[in-house]
Amino acid sequence: MTNASMVEQAMVGFDYNAEAELFPGRNRKSKRQPIGYRRFAHAADAIRFAIEELPPEFLLGAHLEVDEGRHGGGGIRRLYESMDYPLVRRAAA
């Protein structure tokens, strides 16, 4: 089984409608104002926020908690790119 198919298989059971908590990473070198913890009614909204609105330097150390599971920055990106992601993705620039 390839790494890509294992990742997609692991995301199959993910509940995008579950409540989620997003803990952005901290980057001491960043000149931007730190972004703190946020709670979302739906994991899909938290994932969209993390990928589309969170400055990239804060995604690096971020983690998303959903149903006792924890997903790092790479996992958040894979959830966003999954075919199961229920929201419309922002058009690539």
Image (tube, helix red, strand yellow):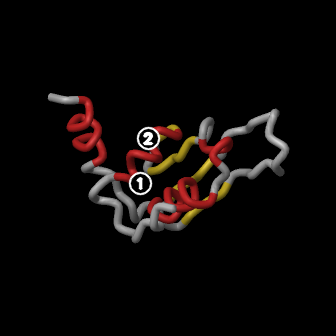
Helix, strand or loop under label 2? helix
Give how far across and how far down residue 34 sits, in percent.
Answer: 79, 48
**Amino acid type at image mark 2:** Gly
Give how far across and how far down residue 59 sits, in percent.
Answer: 60, 44
Q: Tell me the residue at 47%/59% (across/down).
A: 43
User: Residue 38's mark?
Assistant: none
* Residues under numbered marks 2 and 1 in contact, where contact means CB atoms less than 8 Å apart: no
Q: Which of 22 and 68 is in front in this view?
A: 22
Using a 10 Å C-alpha cutoff, classify the residue at mark 2 as few (fewer than 14 neighbours), some (14 to 19) or many (20 or more). Answer: some
Using a 10 Å C-alpha cutoff, classify the residue at mark 1 as few (fewer than 14 neighbours), some (14 to 19) or many (20 or more). Answer: many
* Vertical placement of residue 12 versus 10, above or below: below
Q: Position of 32 compared to 24: left or right?
A: right
Q: Tell me the residue at 28%/59% (across/down).
A: 84
| Residue closest to the far left | 1
**Amino acid type at image mark 1:** Tyr
Helix, strand or loop under label 1? helix
Disc on the earlier residue, 2 or 1: 2
* Vertical placement of residue 44 versus 5, above or below: below
Figure quadrant of residue 8:
top left
Distance (Cα) linking label 2 and label 1? 9 Å
Where does label 1 land, which residue? 80
Q: Which of 9 and 13 is in front in this view?
A: 9
Give how far across and how far down residue 15 sits, in percent.
Answer: 35, 57
Q: Tell me the residue at 56%/60% (across/down).
A: 52
Give how far across and how far down residue 64 sits, in percent.
Answer: 53, 46
Q: Tell me the residue at 30%/46% (across/down).
A: 11
Where does label 2 land, which residue? 75
Q: Position of 36 compared to 10: left or right?
A: right
Image quadrant containing the N terminus: top left
